[in-house]
Image (cartoon, rainbow, N blue to C red):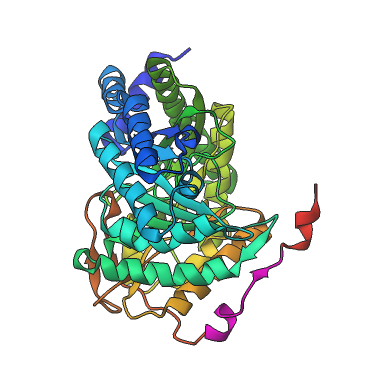
Amino acid sequence: MINIHEVVETNQMIEKENLDVRTITMGISLLDCISSNLDELCDNIYKKITTVAKDLVHTGQEIEKKYAIPIVNKRISITPAALVGGAACKTPEDFAQIAKTLDKAAHEVGVNFIGGYSALVSKGMTTADELLIRSIPLALSTTELVCSSVNLGSTKTGLNMDAVRLMGEVIKETAELTKEKDSLGCAKLVVFCNAPDDNPFMAGAFHGVTEADTIINVGVSGPGVVKTALEKVRGESFEVLCETIKKTAFKVTRVGQLVAKEASKMLGVPFGIIDLSLAPTPAVGDSVADILCEIGLEHAGAPGTTAALALLNDQVKKGGIMASSYVGGLSGAFIPVSEDQGMIDAVEAGALTLEKLEAMTCVCSVGLDMIAIPGDTKATTISGIIADEMAIGMINQKTTAVRLIPVIGKGVGETVEFGGLLGHAPVMPVNQFSCDAFVNRQGRIPAPVHSFKN
């Protein structure tokens, strides 16, 4: 039972500590929409999304009113579009028609984003996969709400280096086609190793083929709540520190569980997972970097940062799994740059570099996220950075991701403004030494030896 003290405590978290439910994401399978006729396929997709998700936004608003819990985003994820469009799409332009249909449907039902313009190519690419990947720049430059992702590797299959090389080129082209908006298209494009099927967070959300026809996943966030809790135990031992994070994560996850169950009941859709991720926003006090500072660092990036982040990530997961039997997605701590004012401050102070961020991704939930780099960065260099991050995920049996934004026309030290939850970011320097010969080899990097466990 919830007592009055816990009600007051939760209200305090919401009002003063930036606690929110970051997203209710409805996953929708589009496998039953498949047709060899493109017009019929797009019509099927539009009808299914606008029928199944017609009450999603209204339901979210009703739950907000009922419980006074902010629900920042209402989103949709779909079956990876490369699987859905393979029979009908013969050119990249054909796939872009699917993206426009998704965008139209998303606007119709009123959601913030729709994810799943995706391909899963960890071992090889089908013709449809490659066509979709090559269509991404056009798709993201001609739509508003569509998000795209590509899974390039896994612990079981290794890294598809042909796809890694291609994605470097795709990211550069997407940046060029959206340069009038500071290359914003790249903020809606992420590449993964070991992508989960049930991720409610954009830009990487898609509805996995292992999922039910329709599900509800909820993503909860609360960096400000954790920071406030830690302020009360300054100077205490690591044991006290860990217990405080764990208990706080438990409380935050219970809020998400409440919202998820209510949304599931109201929509008549099965509940999938709770993703407890400390996903920061540009709001002051809603920063993962600030938590690291509260743990004892002058700035994120100082010696000890990776250890502090490992501690934080582990305790968040431990608290979350005690609060819900269905914790999934990417649960843990996110370390995006543009979306976290503390990270931005650390970059500007010279404490945080791209290489240190890469080291931190060994122990956080995702990877190199929302990082602005010079617009003249070569496609092969981008592919090399992607390959490094994918290798970390493959070897460590964890999800890693890359969301880089080569800002066309801007260089190191300049600032790019994305607005809203995407925030702003300083353009960070990139290692200038060439990896061309490495990236241009063909084939894939084999799976590591521990992948043979079965």
> Is residue 298 depicted above or below 45 in this figure?
below
> Is residue 131 depicted above or below 205 in this figure?
below
- Residue 275 located left or right of residue 410: right
- Quarter of image, res 28: top left
Residue at 49% in and 22% down: 270
Image spot of residue 112 (x, y percent): 28, 40
Residue at 67% in and 62% down: 158
- Residue 369 located left or right of residue 388: left
- Is 443 in the magenta? yes
Image spot of residue 438 (x, y percent): 59, 81
Would residue 194 be seen by someone viewing this image from the given angle?
Answer: yes
Image spot of residue 373 (x, y percent): 35, 73
Residue sticking out furthest to the front: 37
Q: Which residues are magenta?
A: 436-446
- Is 425 in the magenta? no
Q: How many marks?
A: 0
Residue closest to the eye, 258 or 59? 59
- Quarter of image, res 2: top left
- Quarter of image, res 348: bottom left
Residue sticking out furthest to the left: 180
Residue closest to the eye, 347 or 124? 124
Residue at 59% in and 27% down: 325
- Residue 253 located left or right of residue 158: left
Image spot of residue 310 (x, y percent): 57, 54
Would residue 336 be seen by someone viewing this image from the given angle?
Answer: no
